[in-house]
């Protein structure tokens, strides 16, 4: 299997790398510190129009002060490069499909897949669509990065380059371009968008012999009455005709799986499996727990009388953290220089993605509408068939450069839906299907799989970031949201006038036939996308009567909403728990920032509520019986010291393969969908799902799961269940994106940090997700936690996973990791007075 990031060829360099580490140790501190940034004093930065000041606090958080936007974004590019250039360079190689240039032949398949999708190809088109003003910001940022590069190369740029020189002879660093920044947005959209995996799994399950009804059992409808959606249709801001322009979600036959040729499902699976092996730019995780929490509380419920806003995006756990904390401040706010914004940025991208300015605050969670469709295409020579007519395939040629190997030339073929991703499947493409395998009405022959995805059409998301950063009110916020094409997000809002709101942005397709839940026949134009949902008909609410808005990847709309967004929502355990906690807090009186932070760390396991009573009734003996006693006293909180949590989670891990043994190898995931499905089956002890090869019947399956769990934990944690701790199982090692999974101990020691333990788990507000098929280690995390107080901007708090620096052994490389694991926060100061008071370093950049 292909590694997602680092190639297997690295193992052949073990002896050389070990020697490098020993030499570095002998050379001492100087070797490690060569690439550390200058953060005090004065530096010349050619290209500036005037002097810029960069203040850093004791956690390395930078605040940039400039007289004009040219200098502001140039200094941001310089600052990002100082702290995170290897991360930026690695990301641009991934997004351009150029990882083989860094790591050699084993990355060719990854590059072929990415080149075929064409992220950078689309980004190049996007640059031309942007306003001159936005292009200027991107150009200035690139100039700042390149100004830093003028004085840094090899190990002087980052320790990773020194290691790369040993592995493959080195790497010539190229200048940064604005398109490098735009291509990063495609990676963000890839990690957060679509339901390709679910779409493919449903087709695989049908192909494996399950009925559509059985598949529906595994993908049940969202439980609207149990877990509140984000909005009610009656609250939507929807100008225009009553009922909007939609025809409603598909019903009846429209929801059934289309008939597809025999033999194409393995190719569909190959496309999805190859996608799962790609590097994850928002953290190295394919966990189903990628999601997020955000909520906003209106001033009528707060001590200050003004809103509080909280956010914690759930992403893969990476080193360094996905986020970079920064403030961008015009020394005087004018129409020409309108920025006074602080928050979380992405290295490689100008502006602030999540945060606050002097008037408003905002947060993101993933809406995750279905914006990806796989189409099975009928190929006819150099063309493809649509409605009986052969249309020409579009083609383009790409050359992949390979470190230590020969160049690889590929031809990318595309239909009007999108690129033929089956051409990339494990380097083999899609074998022709038998001539008579086509469905009725098709000519039969060769088939291929194409991908239609909103992010493969040029868009204006980059525009949205700057519009959002300078928004001053709800109208400005919604203008920014209207420019936000992909990935479609839940945006929460609060302002210093006391208003709160929610807006779902994004390009969400309207399909002619079908609902996107299964791959579609490309030869039938009835299944084509017809349009996108108009922005004014996307879910939105402003100053709801409740004074509270909660988004945590649950359904964004109620059952009456007029359009089809997706059926693959999170099932709402986190969102409902946040709603319940807020109800409790508001019943006790006004809330404050600490109340919001406490909710961030809540570890109550709502998915266990329906399961534990049945576990307590199952008959077990020996170690399982002793462990069962821990469940009798368990309060359902997954704290690190909890024995009950440890035994429950282990039982859950063993329950899924016993219960769903007929799904092998398409195992049910332990995320919120799995929790909801199991909860329903517990009330149906006669269901066929309880009839397994190893155990049969509900109580017998539950007892077998507890027996297996007790045996595993006895081996891992000792004989006495009272001494078992969830924190001993549930730990995080922050893993370096490019070198952290090399399998070479000394290299991983250089770059990885941890382990640290944490409370929480999948489907829990403190969403420290874990992969039940692999073990208990944390794979997805609240990548940052933020609480913004609109009554006092400097009373806000924040933290992210690791630290602001990307340089191994720098003091700010991992200084936030321990506080993050314990639920600690840092002061999120934004006014110039507070920033100067907190500053420990001042760097003056001069023209």
Image (cartoon, rainbow, N blue to C red):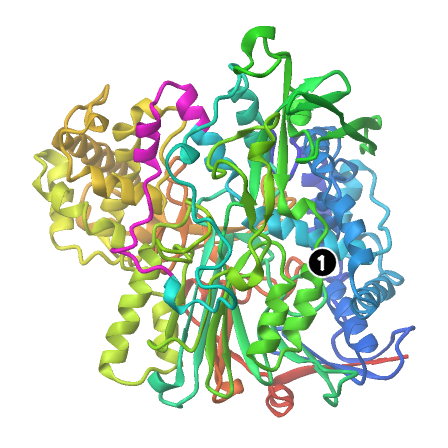
Residue occupying the far front of the picture: 241
Q: Is residue 532 left or right of residue 164?
A: left
Magenta stretch: residue 223 in it? yes
Residues 577 and 809: in front is: 577
Q: Residue at x 27, y 59 (%)?
A: 604
Q: Is residue 23 above or below residue 666?
A: below
Q: Is residue 715 left or right of residue 635?
A: right
Q: Is residue 586 above or below residue 436?
A: below
Name the quadrant containing residue 212: top left
Quarter of the image where the C terminus is located: bottom right
Where residue 187 appears, x then y in whole percent? 65, 49
Name the quadrant containing residue 108: top right
Q: Is residue 151 above or below residue 317?
A: below
Residues 107 and 208: in front is: 208
What is the magenta range? 203-229
Q: Is residue 315 left or right of residue 208?
A: right
Where residue 73 appears, x then y in whole percent? 77, 72
Residues 185 and 695: in front is: 185
Quarter of the image where the N terminus is located: top right
Q: Residues within 10 Å of mark 1 (few under 14, many from 20)?
A: some
Q: Is residue 705 visible?
A: yes
Secondary structure found at label 1: helix
Magenta stretch: residue 699 in it? no
Where residue 215 appears, x then y in whole percent? 35, 30
Name the quadrant containing residue 464: bottom right
Q: Which residue is mark 1?
A: 32
């Amino acid at each position: 299997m292909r590694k997602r990031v680092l190639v297997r060829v690295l193992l052949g360099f073990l002896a050389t790398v070990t020697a490098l580490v020993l030499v570095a140790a002998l050379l001492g501190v100087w070797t490690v510190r060569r690439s550390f940034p200058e953060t005090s004093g004065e530096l010349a930065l050619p290209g500036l129009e005037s002097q810029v000041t960069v203040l850093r606090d004791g956690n390395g958080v930078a605040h940039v002060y400039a007289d004009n936007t040219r200098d502001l974004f140039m200094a941001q590019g310089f600052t990002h490069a100082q702290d995170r250039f290897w991360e930026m360079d690695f990301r641009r190689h991934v997004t351009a499909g150029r990882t083989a240039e860094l790591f050699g032949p084993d990355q060719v398949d990854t590059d072929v897949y990415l080149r075929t999708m064409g992220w950078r190809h689309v980004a190049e088109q996007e640059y031309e669509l942007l306003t001159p003003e936005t292009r200027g910001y991107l150009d200035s940022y690139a100039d700042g990065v390149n100004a830093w590069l003028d004085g840094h190369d090899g190990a002087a740029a980052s320790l990773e380059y020194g290691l790369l020189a040993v592995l493959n002879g080195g790497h010539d660093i190229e200048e940064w371009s604005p398109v490098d920044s735009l291509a990063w947005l495609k990676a963000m959209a890839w990690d957060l968008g679509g339901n390709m995996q679910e779409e493919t799994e449903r087709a695989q399950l049908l192909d494996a012999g399950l009925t559509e009804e059985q598949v529906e059992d595994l993908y049940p409808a969202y439980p609207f009455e149990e877990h509140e959606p984000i909005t009610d249709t009656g609250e939507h801001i929807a100008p225009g005709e009553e009922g909007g322009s939609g025809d409603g979600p598909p019903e009846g036959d429209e929801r059934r799986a289309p008939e597809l040729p025999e033999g194409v499902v393995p190719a569909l699976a190959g496309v999805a499996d190859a996608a799962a092996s790609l590097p994850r730019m928002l953290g190295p995780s394919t966990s189903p727990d990628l999601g997020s929490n955000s909520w906003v509380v209106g001033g009528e419920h707060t001590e200050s009388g003004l809103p509080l806003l909280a956010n914690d995006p759930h992403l893969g756990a990476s080193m360094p953290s996905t986020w970079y904390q920064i403030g961008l401040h015009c020394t005087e706010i004018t129409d020409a220089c309108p920025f006074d914004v602080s928050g979380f940025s992405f290295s490689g991208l100008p502006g602030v993605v999540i945060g606050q300015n002097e008037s408003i605050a905002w947060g993101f969670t993933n809406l995750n509408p279905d914006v990806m469709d796989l189409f099975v295409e009928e190929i006819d020579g150099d063309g493809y068939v649509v409605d009986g007519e052969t249309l020409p395939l579009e083609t383009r040629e790409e050359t992949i450069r390979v470190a230590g190997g020969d160049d690889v030339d590929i031809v990318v073929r595309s239909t009007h839906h999108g690129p033929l991703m089956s051409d990339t499947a494990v380097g083999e493409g899609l074998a022709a299907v038998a001539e008579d395998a086509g469905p009725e009405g098709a000519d039969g022959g060769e088939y291929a799989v194409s991908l239609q995805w909103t992010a493969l059409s040029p868009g204006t998301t980059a525009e949205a970031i700057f519009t959002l950063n300078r928004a001053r009110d709800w109208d400005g916020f919604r203008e920014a949201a209207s420019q936000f094409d992909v990935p479609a997000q839940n945006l929460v809002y609060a302002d210093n006038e006391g208003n709160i709101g929610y807006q779902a942005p994004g390009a969400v397709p309207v399909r002619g036939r079908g609902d996107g839940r299964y791959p579609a026949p490309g030869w039938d134009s009835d299944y084509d996308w017809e349009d996108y949902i108009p922005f004014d008909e996307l879910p939105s609410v402003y100053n709801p009567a409740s004074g509270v808005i909660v988004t945590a990847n649950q359904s964004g709309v109620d059952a009456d909403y007029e359009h089809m967004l997706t059926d693959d929502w999170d099932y709402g355990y986190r969102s409902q728990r946040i709603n319940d906690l807020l109800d409790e807090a508001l019943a006790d009186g006004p809330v404050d920032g600490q109340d919001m932070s406490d909710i961030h760390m809540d570890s109550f396991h709502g998915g266990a509520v329906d399961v534990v009573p049945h576990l307590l009734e199952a008959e077990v003996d020996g170690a399982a019986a002793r462990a069962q006693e821990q469940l009798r006293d368990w309060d359902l909180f997954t704290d690190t010291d909890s024995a009950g949590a440890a035994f429950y989670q282990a039982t859950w891990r063993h329950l899924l393969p016993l219960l769903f043994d007929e799904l092998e190898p398409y195992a049910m995931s332990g995320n919120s969908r799995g929790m909801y499905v199991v909860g329903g089956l517990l009330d149906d002890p006669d269901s066929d799902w309880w009839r397994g090869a190893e155990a049969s019947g509900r109580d017998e399956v539950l007892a077998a799961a507890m027996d297996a769990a007790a045996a595993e934990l006895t081996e891992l944690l000792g004989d006495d269940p009272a001494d078992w701790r969830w924190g001993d199982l549930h730990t995080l090692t922050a893993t370096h994106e490019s070198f952290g999974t090399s399998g070479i101990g000394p290299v991983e020691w250089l770059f990885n940090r941890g382990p640290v333990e944490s409370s929480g788990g999948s489907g829990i507000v403190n969403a420290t997700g874990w992969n039940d098929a692999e073990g208990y280690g944390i794979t997805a995390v609240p990548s940052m936690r933020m609480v913004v107080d609109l009554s006092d901007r400097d009373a806000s708090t924040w933290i992210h996973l690791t630290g602001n620096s990307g340089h191994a052994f720098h003091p700010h490389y991992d200084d936030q990791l321990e506080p993050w694991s314990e639920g600690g926060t840092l002061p999120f100061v934004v006014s110039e007075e507070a920033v100067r008071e907190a500053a420990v370093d001042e760097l003056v950049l001069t023209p």
